[in-house]
Image (cartoon, rainbow, N blue to C red):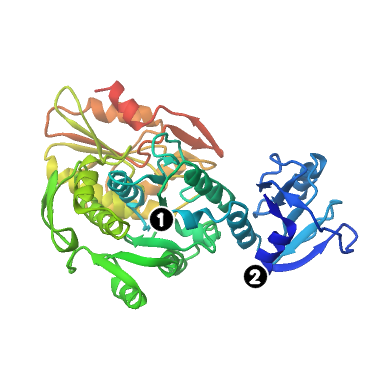
Amino acid sequence: MITIEQVLEVLKKDHNFRDIIDQDNYYYSWTGVTFDHLSYDSRDVTPSSLFFAKGAAFKPEFLENAVKAGLSFYVAEKDYQVGVPAIIVSDIKQAMSLVAQAFYQYPQDKLKLLAFTGTKGKTTAAYFAFNILKQSHKPAMLSTMNTTLDGKTFFKSTLTTPESLDLFRMMAEAVANGMTHLIMEVSSQAYLTKRVYGLTFDVGVFLNISPDHIGPIEHPTFEDYFYHKRLLLENSRVVIVNSGMDHFDFIAEEVADKEHDFYGKNSDNAVKHGSGFSFKASGKLAGDYDIQLIGDFNQDNAMAAGLACLRLGASLQDIKEGIAQTSVPGRMEVLTQTNGAKIFVDYAHNGDSLDKLLQVVTSHQDGRISLILGAPGNKGESRRKDFGHVLNTYPDVDIILTADDPNKEDPLAICQEIASHISREVRIIVDREKAIKTAMSETTDSKDAVVIAGKGADAFQIVNGKRDNYAGDIEVAKKYL
């Protein structure tokens, strides 16, 4: 519950309140109005809802439909003149986040908050942290792959970082469930669209940065992308930063006056003698570790999560046990065919993560290696060129280009665009299941490998803005073992 007086107090404190007007631009007598529901979906309103008219695609008819359903108040950046009072603000996204915090009674103050950002590795690091913290605490987790608000039941997320109304509602649910910690992935989009506006994290982790999410509906430039990533550091009490990442010197200078730990090469907290399914660490996490996820980058993700959790009350024993127990759906999952060939399923969905994946596979398998790869439609167009540049450095890898969430674009055209950046012949099999079946049928022995990149554990294809039926890469691969 929240009164209109409380709503206005929050908005005024943020210098975001402009006016309350009714249809005829006269002041409205609003004393005593109370809201028991917040919504930005016009199909989800009651007479006691406070509705937020937000988004580039918002249409006045959405609000008109909400008024017909009984809505009596809304927040917007302009008066839509629909016959009910409007609270006019300068920034609707800021208003949503701050009003949601107040409505749910500031649940963030009752949880220890850990956030991960980076171009890649956020989900893996979040899973490491979840498994570490659950040894002695009660963590909830909001991740690209899965969300849990009680530490037991998991459901698929729709956004890497939820809209603010959903975020604070889920935080409140985690508090009600007795959770002590919340682990989040925080995307650059979350800061661009102010989903976490006004939120301070106890620990913020910056894993890495490389060009991604640059396009007409995302970030216009790399500078803009990098800036919005760094906002997590500005809004965290303690920061953990990868000393091996690009632009590290710039970030190190920015966080010099903040509580921090660095990890990775050229830092005290580093992986020593990492090989296969174990590694030795130096620094604050000094010791020997077992790990299910192969690859240097996964050992670095484990170090990042370990250092963050150490700051949040985890013991070294918790960290060792948590890392050893961690596996991630769609992240470096390995199947074995009856002929011994290995099938690697991984979410690698940009040039940098694809390069890291192929480094790991080519170091373990020395036979025929086939890669199945696509790129999503209507987002991250720069990835297509990046894929080409990476694949030109692996001339012995066979390439089959296929569909990967084409959305409103033609999947064949996407494949052809990727192929135009590759300096050798490739095959295009748009049907993803047929592409997987074909590659697996061509293996002969235990030296061979098929790498299925991009979709990870996603059991759907996004076509024309909707999720079409698709069994998922792992399930498809199991059919043809």
- Of all residues shown, which one is farthest toward the left? 273
Query: Which residue is under mark 2?
Result: 13
Secondary structure under tag 2 reads: helix
Query: Which residue is under mark 1?
Result: 112
Q: Residues within 10 Å of mark 1 (few under 14, many from 20)?
A: some
* 223 and 450: which is toward the camera: 223
Q: Residue at x 19, y 25 (%)?
A: 337
* 111 and 160: which is toward the camera: 111
Residue 463 shown left or right of residue 438 in the figure: right
Residue type indicated by callout 2: Lys
Q: Residue at x 43, y 28 (%)?
A: 470
Q: Position of residue 248 (x, y in %)?
A: 29, 70
| Label 1, label 2: how far apart the Cα atoms are | 25 Å
Q: Residue at x 19, y 35 (%)?
A: 449
* 114 and 247: which is toward the camera: 114
User: Residue 236's quadrant in the figure?
Assistant: bottom left
* 476 and 101: which is toward the camera: 101
Q: Residues within 10 Å of mark 2 (few under 14, many from 20)?
A: few
State which quarter of the image contains the C terminus.
top left
The answer to whether one can see residue 247 in this image is: no
Q: Residue at x 74, y 41 (%)?
A: 46
Q: Is residue 208 above or below residue 43?
A: below
Residue 474 shown left or right of residue 17 in the figure: left
Q: Position of residue 33 (x, y in %)?
A: 78, 53
Residue 70 shown left or right of residue 317 in the figure: right
Q: Is residue 411 above or below residue 381?
A: above
Query: Could you tell which of marks 1 and 2 lies nearer the N-terminus?
Result: 2
Secondary structure under tag 1 reads: strand
Residue type indicated by callout 1: Lys
Residue 58 shown left or right of residue 354 in the figure: right
Q: Is residue 457 above or below residue 18?
A: above
Q: Position of residue 436 (x, y in %)?
A: 31, 30
